[in-house]
Amino acid sequence: MNKKSIQVQAPGRINLIGEHTDYNQGFVLPAAIDKRTVFSIEVNGTPNRCTVLATQIHESLEFDLNSIRPVSAGWQNYILGVVHELQQLGARMTGFDASFQGNVPIGSGMSSSAALECSLAFGLNELFDLGLDTWDLIRASQMAEHHFVGIKCGIMDQFASMLGKPNSVMLLDCRTLEYSYVPLELGDYQLLLLNTQVSHELASSDFNLRRSSCEEGLAFFQKQHPGVTSLRDVDGALFENTNRIYRYQLPIG
């Protein structure tokens, strides 16, 4: 291993089309933004001891690579989750010290969590020459939220943070993971990001409830149409047909 330290960054994102469609295997149209999280990571010479400093809030985390488990709550679980998920993919790391800071507004719906996860995952992959590809890093970051934070998010946020390009939006098929870049040419128009002062805290919101509702809806359609594998498969004709069957089966009076 030649590298002893590294500095990496990953952006937040906006999404133009496709809310709550990523975990339903639909399409999304996100774009990376010019606000980011920056991670500095260096090998500390120990076999397993790791420390991470959240510079802006003056909080720190210390953990052992051989005994990683979730803590009660907080940004620490994003860090622990990423390291754990990389280990699940076969990553072999030694102790490291890291610090991070950024300007992605927290709780604003611009995926500060994905920027944190992806910058750390990318940095560790480079620092320790783990040999993981981009999709490995995206999935590891996504699974960190599932298993350590408790949010069953789709893949859009991490995808946009890891693969975003300047002046482009990305059309992602969340079923096949095929994607393409589309130039964002607004002409005389502009996209405005407005701070509504409403915090978008997924961990304390109804995000998982929304996903659970989608899963219940999927199960309903699958009773009538076993070939349906996601809500993406439910087009207008199938919806109307199932709705007629359901109304016919309802008891009267």
Image (spheres, rainbow, N blue to C red):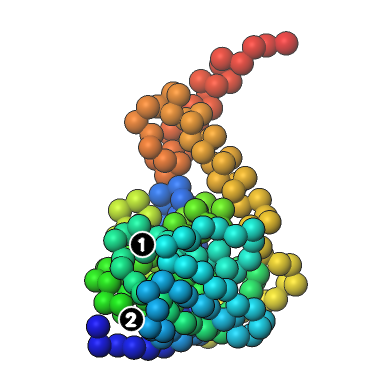
**Residue 174 lies in quadrant:** bottom left
Residue 2 is tagged as none
Q: Which residue is mark 1?
A: 87
Q: Amino acid at mark 2?
A: Leu
Q: Quadrant of the N terminus?
A: bottom left
- Is 46 situated left or right of 204 in this image? left
Figure quadrant of the C terminus: top right
Q: Position of residue 204 (x, y in %)?
A: 68, 56
Q: Circle 2 sits on which residue?
A: 127
Separation of disc 1 and disc 2 at Cα? Answer: 15 Å
Please identify the residue farthest to the front as the structure is shown: 46
SS class, disc 1 = helix
Q: Is residue 116 visible?
A: yes
Q: Please state which of residues 68 and 248 is positioned toward the viewer in this rendering.
A: 68
The residue drawn where x is 51% and y is 20% is 245
- Between 124 and 64, the residue placed more toward the observer is 64
Q: Give the crowd class for mark 2: few <14, some 14-19, many >=20 residues within 10 Å.
A: many
Residue appearing at x 60%, y 85% in the figure: 55
Q: Secondary structure at mark 2?
A: helix
215 is higher (above) or lower (below) than 169: above
Q: Residues within 10 Å of mark 1 (few under 14, many from 20)?
A: some
Count how many numbered circles sit on residues in the image. Answer: 2
The picture places residue 71, in percent across and down from the top left corner, at 60, 60
Which residue is painted at 47% across and 68% down in the image?
A: 64
Residue sticking out furthest to the right: 197
